[in-house]
Amino acid sequence: MMTALDLLDTLEAEAIHIVREALTSASNPLLLFSAGKDSAVLLHLVVKAFAPALPPVRLLHVDTTWKFAEMYRYRDAVVRANGLELIVHRNPQAVAEGINPFDHGALHTTMWKTDGLKQALDALGCDLALGGARRDEERTRAKERIFSLRSARHGWDPRRQRPELWHLFNTQVQDGESLRVFPLSDWTEIDVWRYIEREGIALPDLYFAAPRPTVIRDGNLFVVDDDRFPLDGETPVERVVRFRSLGCYPLTAAIESDARDCAAIITELVESDAGERAGRTIDREDSTLEGKKTEGYF
Amino acid sequence: MSATRVKIVACGSIDNGKSTLIARLLLDTGKLTSDEREAALRGGDGAALASLLDGLAAEREQGITIDVAYRYFATPRRSVVLIDCPGHEQYTRNMVTGASNADLALVLVDATSGVTTQTRRHCRIAHLLGIEDYIFALNKIDLVADPAKVFAEHSRAIDALAGETGLARHNIVPVVATSGANVASRASDMPFYTGPSVLELVEDFAPAETTEAGFRLPIQTVLRGDGSVRRLAGTVASGAVAIGDVIVVLPGEQHATIAAIHVGTTAIDRAVAGQSIAITLDRQVDCARGDVITTASDPAIVADQFKADIAWLGDKPMLAGRAYTLKLATQSVSATVHQPDYRLDIETGQHLAARTLRKNDIGTAIVTTGRDIVSDPYNDNRIMGGFILIDRETGDTVAAGMIRHSLSRSQNIAWQQASVDRDAHARQKGQRAKILWFTGLSGAGKTTIANLVEQRLYAAGLHSFLLDGDNVRMGLNKDLGFTQADRVENIRRVGEVARLMTDAGLIVLATFISPFRAERELVRAMVGDGDFIEIFIDTPLAIAEDRDVKGLYAKARRGEIKNFTGLDSPYEPPEDPQIRVDTTAMTAVEAAERIARYLLRELGTIDD
């Protein structure tokens, strides 16, 4: 409903409402924490929703072992600061087979992320998972519910999703089914940045422009994060770059930018017109984001 | 400072260019990325523009939209959530869902065909869901031969539609979605229209001044911080609250004063509708999820029975009497829906007889909850009056409901137990209290027969009273008309009066058309099954109309009376009345004799 509140106040209040509805209905909820900006905002809102008590939720990081080193440092610092419990899951099969983005392509995402997430949710008996996905990220997501029903096998059936009326959410699940809940559904990328700026939310430095060693492949700008990045006779060149979106480091391309703080990023976004996930090379592989979701990807 | 937000539900029939218009709004407000923009403008005919929004693979394959989609764009003054409702398959379900969260409706009308039944349908649903402001975009105005004339003609039709469906405010804009004329910027080649573009109207939209709504805070959870301080957390559904306000925790009568208000860890002095807060009270109260905190001077209604409009969304039809889970604000209770009073013809607004509600049907029915819940009528408060029903076996959301009014107001009034009760009153009169409920068409002979029955009872020394439909409407119910809602209220009041009279030990003869089974059942439930005798005065419509003692049928046939039972308003005959009187087979005197004997046997005064 329209109110006299300004946009950020409205979005914050709605997200807190959703988080409270979700966490008071679930018996074993998890917050999927990827160390990216959206999950940072989500965690901030979850803490705010239950202050001064601790939020009744554990954090789950489905680790691919291929995140940027700084994301791990950031993740551990944030968890310590909030006093919450963090569970890290790495798909043991992917560990054993040494699955990596350089040699295994799409299999890397399937095994580490999709399979890893399903394994962790099953092993932990999770009935509700909070995630930071937004509807404006990609056109398939435009039709996603805020409370998205997943089958016992984690599948997403677009025809079985429940109508969502007013601010009422149907939290009932049958045996084995679970809910994925997206409190930031109605936020846009700019809203997220304005909120980060207003609330002073800490983020990995990778979001802010700095000189970093880079190589260019297929027109994409990659940051050489550590010596696991196989150089094909290339010499990394130092460029002032930042990331709009953070995934696994070899799969996430950087952009050239001078934006060193939130205000500069907001200005850049207003003027830019490239898609937010444009740097995510996985979206462009054979299967679409919709296909990944149907199989259980977040 | 960011802009305020508005949520718009966009509706239109297939092929009148809704997707193109939405894509155009996104394009012209700079929401599309450069590659999307390039793809969108390919071909130049708008087809590529529209396909930009087809999100799911299944939709792309079928070339249609199957689900509600949410789009976002912003101007410096306004942040917009556009709720895109497909206009064909499952139209009602999608429209109801989309409209439930919208402030404003954007209705697409094709200038080459004008107002259609679908346009009526969209307006009626949006209006039912409480939307007051409408923008009609008259699209493809460039495709008609004489745009000025067509615009004027269609505008008259839209004005008429708005009046007929009761839309509070509306604007009409001629647009060309493919070129963007009058969408995000004003057209330069439409001399017959000099008004604002669609986007300007969206930017200028100001919701109607809401009357000072009472403060409502449905409690989501109770937070315990350090020490013993408890904070009650929830989202303000309406009104405002400030430190020092006296509140009441509903249902119940615990009063307290607001000591502190927090958003997160920040203390604030005052909170308004839409804010997610946590409040601290000046004393310990018993309060849990599902309770509602309201200002003490203006509490919500506490009741367990309602009249509600219900939109059925589930694949399986509604089952009257079955237990569903009802969710309203933060309350979750077991609830049953009675057989509907009627089903709404969404195109014409007519009320049709119905035994159940099927997917995409909208109807009116009584809902009974397993325990008292806290609510307000939907028209006063969308959050406190809107509910969903959940199928307990499948977990599916099967219905959306809007409370029109409560039928059993307990509202903080405790029933006073009288020490001289119904039986004592009746014993003193040497009888037992009963209700003889005469139902049947107008002109069936209810009052005539009831009068004869009462004379018989009087002669037998029994204490009775005749409550007549016409007489009650001259006094107690003179504020009520003959709409379905008023008829329900008419019977509810009469039922209450009859109940009070039976409590005084009287035998009450009530003669009311009472066309709906649900209301008669309601009265039966009020007075107790054993004391309610349903008498069906069964006269075929043709004979009642032929007699037409009061000349009412003739008037109704001339259109001077609307909602006339048997003609344009349904009559639901009793399924299993205690007594059925076929007036074509016996005289009024014979009928009265039969009824009197039945009663006297019930009272044990005679036996055979």
Image (cartoon, grey):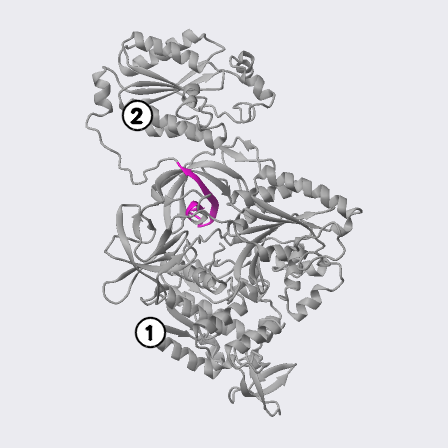
Left or right of residue B120, residue B139 in this image? right
- Which amino acid, by three-letter code, is at mark 1? Gly
Q: Nearer the viewer, residue B31 or A59?
A: B31
Q: Which residue is mark 1?
A: A83
Crowd tier of the residue under label 2, counting other residues whose Cα lies within 10 Å: few below 14, some 14–19, many 20 or above: some
Does residue A120 sit above or below B515 in this rendering? below
On the question of residue B88 being in view, the answer is: no
Q: How many marks?
A: 2
Residue closest to the far right: B145
- Which amino acid, by three-letter code, is at mark 2? Leu
Crowd tier of the residue under label 1, counting other residues whose Cα lies within 10 Å: few below 14, some 14–19, many 20 or above: few
Left or right of residue B288, residue B163 in this image? right
- x, y (%) of residue B420? 20, 25
How far apart are the two marked residues, 1 and 2, measured between alpha carbons?
62 Å
Does residue B390 sit above or below A70 in this rendering? above
On the question of residue A69 being in view, the answer is: yes
Give the magenta range: B384-406
Secondary element at image label 2: helix
Q: Magenta region, mostly helix, strand or loop?
A: strand
Residue closest to the far left: B419
Q: Label for residue B500? A: 2
Left or right of residue B570, residue B50 in this image? right
The question of residue B421 being in magenta is answered with no
Does residue B417 sit above or below B605 in this rendering? below
Q: Is disc 2 on the same chain as disc 1?
A: no
- x, y (%) of residue B590? 41, 7
- x, y (%) of residue B452? 38, 9
Left or right of residue B426, residue A38 in this image? right
Secondary element at image label 1: loop
Q: Nearer the viewer, residue A95 or A112?
A: A112
The chain under label 2 reads B
* Residue at point 53%, 76% (across, down): A108
